[in-house]
Image: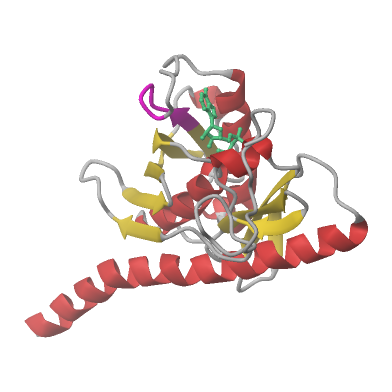
Amino acid sequence: MSGGKPVLIDERGLRVDGRKPDELRPIKIEVGVLANANGSAYIEQGKNKLLVAVYGPRELHPKHLALPDRALLRCRYHMAPFSVEERKSPAPSRREIELSKVIREALEPAILLDRFPRTAIDVFVEVLEADGGTRCAAVTAASVALADAGIPMRDLVVACAAGKVDGQLVVDLCDAEDKYGEVDMPVAYMPSKGVVTLLQMDGILTREEFEKAFKMAILACEKIYEFQKEALRRKFGAVQEEVSGDK
Ligand code: ADP
């Protein structure tokens, strides 16, 4: 530690939590964890813990918001007061309003909204524990919850950040790396379409670094995509077996 900033890359080239630069935090995804939502998912990514609930397509209130040619996608990102070390006010902060918009925009291109004119699809993200990269974990879990709700999509959306800490390019930044590192660059991606639906960057990279970091983020997304599909298979594969077992 020097001047309050922790050492982010040690002499062995490892990160604050012992990871290699291109190593993801451990991920766990569960589908259909809430009985009263149309679709839901729970994700743990390192110390992040998030729940996502999806409702819809359903009748829209207030009605004047209805779109004649497609469904209206609404997202609410919320951090529980106990999700961070200092109690967070339960009132929506500017950051939560911004992240709600960012998450909606990352998901929107994947959903076949034109199949459900005049309806609403609502996505509620509850951050139970936060440790950096919650917008990415939210996008990853939300697309699984949308699939669980049976909402037709072009592909799942996966998100993961790349960035730079102590001069080293890394993926899937934790809170300390986000706070004390030089760059955080969240990317959302539809792997089977090869389409990027979100790219933000906090900090400065050279063009060469950007290209390398971007590739690292895409590779990380492709790994997380396997966890999403596996989670859906665990739920719907089991249903499929039950159905064929009944015959
Ligand atoms: P993201 O979670 O998508 O990386 P930010 O970069 O805005 O979004 O936040 C980084 C991290 O900062 C969060 O994941 C969380 O760990 C921490 N954080 C965010 N808001 C607060 C808050 N109000 N109090 C304490 N920590 C917070």
Magenta segment, which residues?
A: 77-83
User: Within the displayed image, which quadrant is ligand 1 positioned in?
Assistant: top right
Q: Is residue 65 left or right of residue 167?
A: left
Q: Is residue 117 left or right of residue 216?
A: left
**Residue at 69%, 28% in the rendered image:** 3
Residue 5, above or below 230: above
Q: Position of residue 217 (x, y in %)?
A: 67, 62
Q: Is residue 105 rendered magenta in the image?
A: no
- Using the rendered view, name the quadrant where residue 202 is placed: top right
Q: Is residue 73 left or right of residue 229?
A: right
Residue 243, above or below 11: below
**Residue at 55%, 26% in the rendered image:** 96
Foreground: 69 or 193?
193
Q: Residue furthest left?
A: 246
**Residue at 62%, 39% in the rendered image:** 6
Q: Position of residue 230 (x, y in %)?
A: 37, 72
Q: Quadrant of the C terminus?
A: bottom left
In this rendering, does residue 71 appear at all?
no
Q: Position of residue 152 (x, y in %)?
A: 48, 61
Q: Is residue 206 left or right of residue 43?
A: right
Q: Quadrant of the N terminus?
A: top right
In this rendering, does residue 187 appear at all?
yes
Foreground: 138 or 156?
138
Foreground: 86 or 168?
168
Q: Position of residue 223 (x, y in %)?
A: 53, 70
